[in-house]
Amino acid sequence: MKKIMLTAVALAAFATTNYAQSATAEITQTAPAVAGVAAAAPAEAASPAAQQAEPQKVQVTKENLPQAIQQVLASDSYKDQQFEDAWLVKGSEEVYIVNLKKGDAKTQLKLNKEGKVVS
Protein backbone atom coordinates (compact mmCIF):
# COMPACT_ATOMS: atom_id res chain seq x y z
CA MET A 1 0.00 0.00 0.00
CA LYS A 2 2.88 2.35 0.83
CA LYS A 3 4.41 1.71 -2.59
CA ILE A 4 1.17 2.60 -4.33
CA MET A 5 0.83 5.81 -2.32
CA LEU A 6 4.46 6.81 -2.96
CA THR A 7 4.06 6.10 -6.68
CA ALA A 8 0.87 8.17 -6.80
CA VAL A 9 2.53 11.09 -4.99
CA ALA A 10 5.59 10.94 -7.25
CA LEU A 11 3.40 10.82 -10.36
CA ALA A 12 1.33 13.79 -9.14
CA ALA A 13 4.49 15.79 -8.38
CA PHE A 14 5.93 15.01 -11.82
CA ALA A 15 2.69 15.96 -13.61
CA THR A 16 2.42 19.23 -11.65
CA THR A 17 6.04 20.17 -12.39
CA ASN A 18 5.68 19.32 -16.07
CA TYR A 19 2.46 21.34 -16.37
CA ALA A 20 3.99 24.33 -14.55
CA GLN A 21 6.98 24.35 -16.90
CA SER A 22 4.84 24.17 -20.05
CA ALA A 23 2.49 26.86 -18.76
CA THR A 24 5.44 29.15 -17.95
CA ALA A 25 6.91 28.62 -21.42
CA GLU A 26 3.55 29.33 -23.06
CA ILE A 27 3.08 32.54 -21.06
CA THR A 28 6.60 33.69 -21.95
CA GLN A 29 6.08 33.03 -25.66
CA THR A 30 2.62 34.58 -25.92
CA ALA A 31 2.82 37.52 -23.50
CA PRO A 32 1.17 40.50 -25.26
CA ALA A 33 2.56 44.03 -25.31
CA VAL A 34 0.73 46.44 -23.03
CA ALA A 35 0.01 50.00 -24.22
CA GLY A 36 3.15 50.37 -26.31
CA VAL A 37 5.41 48.56 -23.86
CA ALA A 38 7.19 45.58 -25.37
CA ALA A 39 6.87 42.24 -23.63
CA ALA A 40 9.97 41.17 -21.73
CA ALA A 41 12.05 38.52 -23.48
CA PRO A 42 13.36 35.52 -21.57
CA ALA A 43 16.83 36.05 -20.11
CA GLU A 44 18.43 33.35 -22.25
CA ALA A 45 17.15 34.99 -25.46
CA ALA A 46 18.87 38.25 -24.55
CA SER A 47 22.33 36.75 -24.23
CA PRO A 48 24.58 36.86 -27.32
CA ALA A 49 25.49 33.19 -26.89
CA ALA A 50 21.84 32.18 -27.14
CA GLN A 51 21.34 34.28 -30.27
CA GLN A 52 24.33 32.67 -32.00
CA ALA A 53 23.21 29.17 -31.07
CA GLU A 54 19.93 29.45 -32.98
CA PRO A 55 20.48 30.15 -36.69
CA GLN A 56 18.13 32.48 -38.53
CA LYS A 57 16.62 31.29 -41.81
CA VAL A 58 15.47 33.82 -44.43
CA GLN A 59 14.03 33.01 -47.85
CA VAL A 60 15.94 34.53 -50.79
CA THR A 61 14.78 34.98 -54.38
CA LYS A 62 16.96 33.71 -57.22
CA GLU A 63 17.67 37.29 -58.28
CA ASN A 64 18.89 38.23 -54.79
CA LEU A 65 21.40 35.38 -54.53
CA PRO A 66 25.07 36.43 -54.63
CA GLN A 67 26.51 36.60 -58.14
CA ALA A 68 28.86 33.67 -57.43
CA ILE A 69 25.91 31.41 -56.58
CA GLN A 70 24.00 32.56 -59.65
CA GLN A 71 27.02 31.57 -61.75
CA VAL A 72 27.06 28.11 -60.14
CA LEU A 73 23.35 27.67 -60.98
CA ALA A 74 24.00 28.74 -64.60
CA SER A 75 26.90 26.27 -64.95
CA ASP A 76 26.58 23.09 -67.05
CA SER A 77 26.11 21.03 -63.88
CA TYR A 78 22.86 22.74 -62.85
CA LYS A 79 21.52 24.72 -65.84
CA ASP A 80 19.02 21.95 -66.74
CA GLN A 81 17.52 21.97 -63.24
CA GLN A 82 14.61 24.18 -62.22
CA PHE A 83 15.09 26.59 -59.32
CA GLU A 84 12.56 25.92 -56.53
CA ASP A 85 13.64 28.12 -53.62
CA ALA A 86 16.65 29.36 -51.68
CA TRP A 87 17.28 30.15 -48.03
CA LEU A 88 19.97 32.13 -46.27
CA VAL A 89 20.86 30.53 -42.95
CA LYS A 90 22.72 32.92 -40.65
CA GLY A 91 24.59 31.20 -37.86
CA SER A 92 28.29 31.02 -37.12
CA GLU A 93 28.67 31.46 -40.89
CA GLU A 94 26.25 32.37 -43.69
CA VAL A 95 25.12 29.41 -45.78
CA TYR A 96 22.78 29.52 -48.77
CA ILE A 97 20.57 26.46 -49.20
CA VAL A 98 19.35 26.20 -52.80
CA ASN A 99 16.71 23.65 -53.80
CA LEU A 100 16.61 22.54 -57.43
CA LYS A 101 14.39 20.11 -59.30
CA LYS A 102 14.65 18.15 -62.55
CA GLY A 103 11.63 15.92 -63.12
CA ASP A 104 11.13 13.90 -59.95
CA ALA A 105 14.75 14.31 -58.84
CA LYS A 106 15.49 17.03 -56.30
CA THR A 107 18.88 18.51 -55.48
CA GLN A 108 19.82 20.60 -52.46
CA LEU A 109 22.98 22.69 -52.58
CA LYS A 110 24.61 24.24 -49.52
CA LEU A 111 26.87 27.06 -50.65
CA ASN A 112 28.75 29.95 -49.08
CA LYS A 113 28.51 33.44 -50.59
CA GLU A 114 31.52 32.67 -52.83
CA GLY A 115 29.58 29.78 -54.40
CA LYS A 116 31.65 27.03 -52.80
CA VAL A 117 29.98 23.91 -51.46
CA VAL A 118 29.91 23.65 -47.67
CA SER A 119 29.09 20.58 -45.61
Image (cartoon, rainbow, N blue to C red):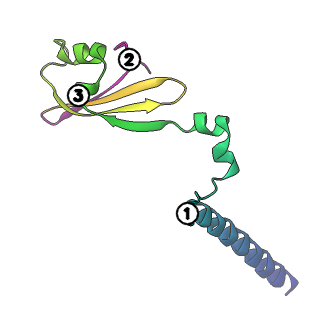
Q: Is residue 112 magenta?
A: yes
Give me the C-alpha separation between circle 1 and circle 3: 36 Å
Question: In front here: 99 or 29?
Answer: 29
The earlier-in-sequence mark between 2 and 1 is 1
The numbered disc on residue 74 is none
Of residue 102 and residue 50, the one placed in the foreground of this image is: 50
Q: Nearer the viewer, mark 2 or mark 1?
A: 1
Say which of 21 and 12 sits in front: 21
- In the picture, measured across the screen, residue 44 lies left or right of residue 26, that is right
Drawn side of residue 116 relative to residue 67, left or right: right
Magenta stretch, residue numbers = 103-119
Q: Residue at x 27, y 26 (%)?
A: 64
- Viewer-side residue, 97 vs 2: 97
Q: Which residue is mark 1?
A: 33
Q: Residue at the bottom extreme?
A: 1
Residue 76 place in picture, x, y as percent: 16, 12
Q: Residue at x 25, y 32 (%)?
A: 61
**Residue 114 appears left or right of 25:** left
The answer to whether mark 2 and mark 1 are in CB contact below 8 A is: no
Picture coordinates of residue 41 (x, y %)?
63, 53
Query: In the image, what residue type sits under mark 3?
Result: Lys
Dot 1 surroundings within 10 Å: few (below 14), some, or many (20 or more)?
Answer: few
- The residue singled out by tag 3 in the image is 62
Q: Quadrant of the N terminus?
A: bottom right
Given contact means CB atoms under 8 Å apart, are the residues at marks 2 and 3 in contact?
no
Classify 60 as above or below 66.
below
- How many callouts does the rendering have? 3
Estimate the spatial distance between the alpha carbons at disc 2 and disc 3, rounded to whole Å: 13 Å
Give the quarter of the image for residue 23.
Answer: bottom right
The amino acid type of the residue labelled 2 equals Lys
